[in-house]
Image: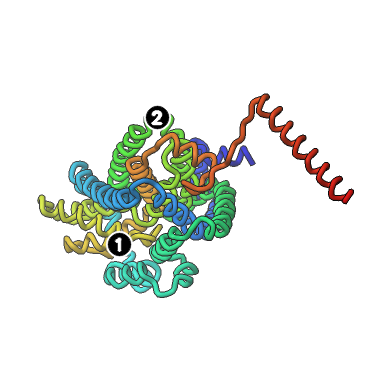
Amino acid sequence: MKALQTFSQSPLGLLLCLAVGGLAGVFAAPAGAFAYFIGQLYLSVVNMAAVPLLVVATFFGLRQVLALPRPGVRVATIAGLAVGLVALCALGGTLAGVLMMPGQNLSAAAHAQLGELVLKSASDAEEMRITLFGPLSHAAASVSPYGVQDLFPDNFYRVLAQGRSLGILTGTILFGLAFATLSSERSQMLNNVFEGVYRALEVVIAHANLLIPVLAFGMSAHLTAHTERATLSAMGGFLLAFVAATALVGGAALIAIAARSTAPFGRVLQGLKAPLVVALSSGSATAPIPHTIESMSATLGFSRGVAELVVPFGSVFLRAGSALYFALATVFVANLYDRPLDAGDIALIGAASALAAFVSAGQNGVATVGYMGVVLSFLHLPVEAAGVLFVSIDLICEGPRNVLSLLTVCAVIALVSAGLPSEWLQSSADPHGEQGGAQVLSFTFTRAQLVLAAGCVVVAASLIVLMGIGVGAR
């Protein structure tokens, strides 16, 4: 078990799985298909456990943040930083696209390959609409009703069963605020129940994450088996620009975390290795939640209460990786269709990408690509044709998107959390203990005090015996 856990968190081991999976997709397609099927089962198990974990972690985080000094300022700072960092990532993606200009100088063969891919999808338009663009176009066309209904559900149990993250967070926050007003005597029993649920879900996800190498192998095999090399070559400029921009912004986030933790950069990177590997290879924004909370609190010393509130909240709302992806993809499509961009268009792309990132809250995988239409529609660029191109490479882009979003969440924790040693020691000893609760009393006696106490006990016992003899004699 220890060896499997080490291998599942090893970057070199996962790179080996990706390389072998790519070869299996070409030369041993059945083995790759079976591994891909096992990987999808893994994602189902992780998502099944991640939804209740999101509820419980948000509940604990909200209670502890409300117990910290100046809770209103901390919560407002978290919300302000979330909006600001997503907007900065959207602007960074736009500027990266303007500087690197992906899609501008494509060869004739690359243009022909992309055009053939779009025409092929258009010839089978009805099937594409059902499998890909039905729900995506609905999400882009009816953003407001979808968002309001999902954010303020009329039945909490329904959204919990359907796994709708926005409605789940709304119900959890309202319940947590009400629960925080109760006294510790009334809430202690439920607090213990949630603690047990929290630990059980952590164990489920930790054991499920042992299958990450199988998922990496299966996804690599699936990608090489179902994607033409000519398509990857034609989209290579965008992929290179996206990975480079993600690495640059992610490096800046790591530097900010190291500066706030006063720890060396190498130690910060080592401490965040497990959640980063899970985010990169699992394709799930919720799978790294337990690893991230543990790394930011126990390893790097930030407030566990802040981490338990920000990490679940950020996995749903703080989609900085999607904001950068939408902006860069829009610039790519504009260059592909020879659409010149001025300063007003650049500002519009940045603002629309940030908006699309928040609108796509709670969505993962291919569903995220559909929200790119929110940005493309502002510039009157073709939505369906662009969607076909990016769906074909979404498996490659999903990992870097999750990594950048995760690093942005960690940066928010570092900037908001005080990171005091007292908070770190308390979270290590009792992660979910209430602050200001009952203290353990410690009695210490000297030798003389012990002799005096023993003498008093002997005298009291003698008096009781004499009183008993006297009462009996009467």
At 57% from the left and 51% from the top, the residue drawn is 199
Q: Which residue is mark 1?
A: 359
Above or below: residue 433 compared with residue 124: above
Q: Which residue is mark 2?
A: 263
Residue 216 visible in the picture: no
Q: Secondary structure at mark 1?
A: helix
Front-lying residue, 414 or 292: 414
Front-lying residue, 167 or 131: 167
Instruction: Give coordinates of residue 413: x percent, y percent.
Output: 37, 44
Residue 256 visible in the picture: yes
Where is the N terminus found, in terms of image quarters?
top right
Front-lying residue, 447 or 79: 447
Instruction: Give coordinates of residue 151: x percent, y percent.
Output: 35, 67
Instruction: Give coordinates of residue 320: x percent, y percent.
Output: 31, 50
Kind of residue indicated by mark 1: Val
**Disc ID at residue 152:** none
Residue 70 as seen in the image, left or right of residue 95: right
Residue 341 as seen in the image, left or right of residue 267: left
Q: CA distance from mark 1 to mark 2?
A: 36 Å
Residue 153 as seen in the image, left or right of residue 102: right
Kind of residue indicated by mark 2: Ala
At 44% from the left and 54% from the top, the residue drawn is 63
Quick one: label 1 or label 2, which is nearer the N terminus?
2
